[in-house]
Amino acid sequence: MKRLICIVCYLFPFLGIAQQELTLEEAVAIALENNYDIRLVSKDVAIADNNVSIGNAGMLPSVSADVSAAAGIQNTTQTLLSGETRAVRGNRTRSSAYGASLDWTIFDGLQMFTRYEQLKELKALGDANLKASILATVYDVVSSYFDLVQQQQLINATQTALDLSAFRHQTAENRYQIGRASKLEVLAASVDLNTDTTNLLRQRDQFRSTQIRLNELLARDVNMVFSVADTIVIGNDLYYDILSQQAKELNPTLQSAIVNHRIAQLELKRIKGERYPIVNLSSAYTRSQSQTALGFSTQSKNNGFSYGISASMNIFNGFQQRRNERNAEFTMEAAEIEVDKVRQNIEAQLLAAYQTYLMNLELVRLEERNKDIAQQNMEITLEKFKLGSIAPLEFREAQRNFVDAVARFSTAQYQAKLAEITLHQIAGTLKMK
């Protein structure tokens, strides 16, 4: 018996040390700050936000500056109208120019305004994707947290079973020493003690694995050891009609589908804008000079301002305009179908989750009564076993019933809590703080 206790303490020393409790609120806050998935999606949102500008939509002019310089050495021969011939060997020429130009599209069939609206919708799409990522992460954190609570309850139940098995084993040893029990009873008690010890080791290993997984979700040192709350509080004030209305307004998946539909509508509007003429303004200021040793003028300087306006319009491009418009219409219709599909899928998920939620609430009440009955039976059986009025097998059966009842009650609580947070996730109301 002492050897088994030493093994347990050696394998799991952290369970015997006072650990700092991690509350659910702290876990969610750490995840929102550190989780890698949230941070990556946040960068995409930052890019989409940075892209929302009138310049990126093509509403502002473009200004450029140019500077050039050139030089050369040439052998030149010129024959004038008078018949005179001039020749220069090693003629050095130089030229330089600099200036600035401005180009501005002042009308393109309102495409620039449509592009600006598309950029804003892409920002809204990024926000919806970020919310979906946050909800998924919070769901994983909350479910893992309450999984630890459930496993801690199972550890406590298994520890109780191990204590009872140790008591039974010690009792069998004492009875065997005074000749009131057979060796068979001692061996049976030893087997049950070893079985309960194994169950406890496995349950603690599962607890530690889930603890490591939660640390990973929180993006912190996976070796951190902590304790969790000892109870699971289940909300019983959820109503389907309210959740359904919230899902229509807040579900990020539905919001993404609606935004994609709006983007498709804007794309069709932009493509139709290609039917209209494009009007451009242009202006430039240039300054140049050149030098040469031979010619009618050996030095030239120029500077001045130029401006103009141009317009172009697509008259016929092999029916490409019509094809592009039809494709954009098909894309818009597909996006509208996707909205209906997502809306129906959310309604189905919500209804199924709500039915599961109601069933699990009833199971929690039922399994709680069973646990209380099994505990009373275990206490009565233990007193009878101490008095020697029942057989060890009957005591073992009561012990198993108690552990099974506690396990079923903990599982029912956990499943009910999962159903609750699933409903909040679908409705888009899962608490993030």
Image (tube, rainbow, N blue to C red):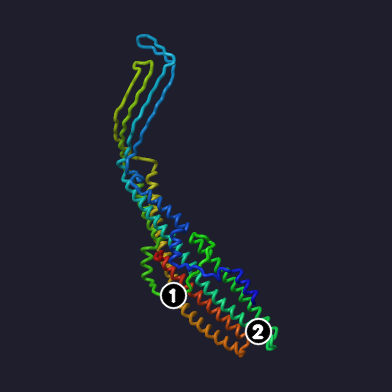
Q: Residue at x 63, y 71 (%)?
A: 7
Question: Residue 213 in the image: x percent, y percent?
Answer: 52, 63
Give the residue pinned by disc 1. 358
Give the residue pinned by disc 2. 172
Q: Residue furthest top?
A: 83
- In the image, is residue 126 above or below residue 8? above
Question: Residue 342 in the image: x percent, y percent?
Answer: 42, 62
- In the image, is residue 75 above or below residue 410? above
Q: Residue at x 36, y 12 (%)?
A: 80
Q: Name the disc covering residue 190, or none.
A: none
Residue type for callout 1: Leu
Q: Nearer the viewer, residue 35 or 17?
A: 17
Quadrant of residue 253 in the image?
bottom left
Residue type for callout 2: Ala
Could you say whether the residue bearing mark 1 is in a helix, strand or loop? Answer: helix
Question: Residue 112 in the image: x percent, y percent?
Answer: 33, 45
Q: Nearer the viewer, residue 360 or 92?
A: 92
Q: Residue at x 39, y 22 (%)?
A: 94
Q: Quadrant of the C terminus?
A: bottom left
Calculate the distance from the C-alpha at mark 1 to the C-alpha at mark 2: 47 Å
